[in-house]
């Protein structure tokens, strides 16, 4: 069961899975400063509010459906 605090965050690997990216790609996004990370114990997580903002700011690539991607992302459980 998730705590209220965990509900506002997503793990790097889980975000990569939800966005159909590699974990390395998510780490590159973090390293570029596009998404902040936080530490909760030994876990590295990303605040969901920042992910939603980042998804809204991204310009969709040709053939990508950013609306469906962000809707899928926002409709799923926050963390594993």
Image (cartoon, grey):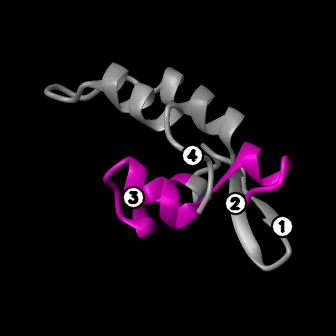
Question: Where is residue 34 shown, x and y percent of the image?
Answer: 60, 43
Residues at marks 1 and 2 touching, judged by CB atoms closer than 8 Å:
yes
Q: In this figure, which residue is indicated by the disc labeled 3?
A: 17
At a point 61% along the width and 27% down the height, the residue shown is: 53
User: Is residue 55 shown above or below 38?
Assistant: above
Tell me the CA gap for discs 1 and 3.
20 Å
Quadrant location, the N terminus: bottom right
What's the mark number on residue 21?
Answer: none
- Residue 39, by quadrant, is bottom right
Q: CA distance from mark 2 to mark 3?
A: 14 Å
Reply yes or no: does residue 78 show up in magenta: no
Crowding at dot 2, Cα within 10 Å, few <14 / some 14-19 / many 20+, comes out as many
Q: Nearer the viewer, residue 28 or 38?
A: 38
Instruction: Assess disc 4: are there few (<14), some (14-19) or many (≥20) residues with their C-alpha within 10 Å of its C-alpha.
Output: few
Residue 77, label in figure: 4
Please give the residue where the numbered disc 2 appears in the rendered image: 45
SS of the residue under disc 3: helix
Q: Where does label 1 land, which residue?
A: 40
Q: Eyeballing the image, is 53 above or below 41?
A: above
Instruction: Please state which of the two labelled residues, at mark 2 or mark 4, is closer to the viewer.
Output: 4
Q: Is residue 74 above or below residue 39?
A: above
């Amino acid at each position: 069961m998730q705590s209220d605090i965990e509900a506002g965050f997503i793990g790097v690997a889980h975000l990569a899975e939800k966005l159909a990216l590699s974990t390395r790609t998510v780490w590159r996004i973090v390293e570029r400063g596009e998404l902040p990370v936080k530490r909760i114990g030994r876990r590295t997580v990303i605040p969901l509010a920042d992910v939603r903002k980042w998804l809204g700011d991204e310009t969709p690539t040709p053939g990508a459906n950013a609306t469906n991607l962000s809707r899928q992302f926002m409709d799923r459980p926050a963390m594993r």
